[in-house]
């Protein structure tokens, strides 16, 4: 299928996160080089400080969050572009409020390894 | 820079199109495998029927358009996901109305060749 409505695609819980689901919008079975996923984090939800073996190219669709990347923490919002290089630790903490934090996250079609950074406490 | 606001990034006119601009959100100088661009087509604008040497992974941010992909024409709108395989001819015709048609378009970091398909008339 060339065209699909993102809302119609299945969502799966992200077990390493809190209040976080992920949809594969274009998977490695369709795109030969990289995949497009959409993450939705409920207000107050997020992902703990962790690393990935692959880089992330992200675009924020709605809501806002504190995003820590290495030693910097950014407040990101709809319309922001986020680049997280491979191997750089990062976390997400969706802002409290009515609106979920939603973003696209593109990754290359390469094997990924997710490693939680211990001793860093909660997600942000 | 890890985080940038898309609206702050420079836009360039897409000469093969009509009323169409493009911003590089994450370029090949930053992302090692693929680039993220944002296209904005004014109401009634678009791109004529053409091919690219690389595939497109797209997400519609706002507005709506007629998008022809090969022999099929789709009416796409905000929240839709579009996949255009390498080499498949396609065109865009933004709907008339108040709102521009805006979408993200991710492409691999490979040499691209754009070829207009002659004799197909206007963009759609």
Image: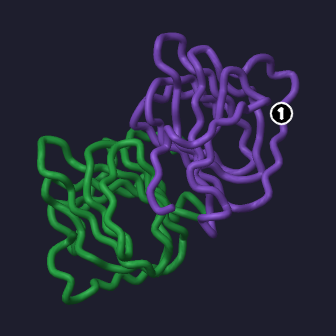
Chain colours: A green, B purple
Residue at (25% x, 55% y) in the render: A65
Tell me the SS state at disc 1.
strand
Percent across and percent down for residue A110 are 53, 76
Q: Which quadrant of the figure has residue B21?
A: top right
Q: Which quadrant of the figure has residue B19?
A: top right
For label 1, the crowd category at 10 Å Cα-Cα, with few meaning under 14, some 14 to 19 and many 20 or more, is some
Up the image or down, A124 lies above or below A112; here it is above
Left or right, A59 with respect to A95, comes to right
Up the image or down, A56 lies above or below A64; here it is below
Q: Which residue is mark 1?
A: B116
Instruction: Depth check: give the residue in front, B92 or B38.
Output: B38
Residue at (20% x, 47% y) in the render: A100
The residue at the far right in this view is: B118
Percent across and percent down for residue A40 are 26, 53
Up the image or down, A52 lies above or below B101; here it is below
Q: Quadrant of the C terminus of chain B?
A: top right
Residue at (45% x, 46% y) in the render: B5
Chain letter, disc 1 residue: B
Percent across and percent down for residue B94 are 57, 21
Instruction: Depth check: give the residue in front, A74 or B36.
Output: A74
């Amino acid at each position: 299928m060339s065209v699909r409505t993102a809302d119609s695609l299945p969502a799966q819980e992200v077990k390493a996160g809190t209040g976080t689901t992920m949809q594969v919008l274009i998977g490695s079975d369709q795109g030969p080089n990289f995949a497009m996923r959409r993450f939705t984090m409920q207000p107050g939800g997020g992902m703990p400080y962790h690393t990935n073996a692959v880089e992330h190219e992200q675009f924020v669709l709605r809501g806002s969050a504190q995003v820590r990347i290495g030693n910097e923490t950014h407040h990101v919002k709809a319309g922001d572009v986020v680049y997280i290089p491979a191997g750089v630790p990062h976390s997400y903490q969706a802002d409290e409020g009515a609106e979920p934090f939603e973003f696209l996250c593109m990754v290359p079609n390469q094997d990924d390894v997710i490693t939680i950074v211990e001793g860093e406490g909660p997600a942000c």
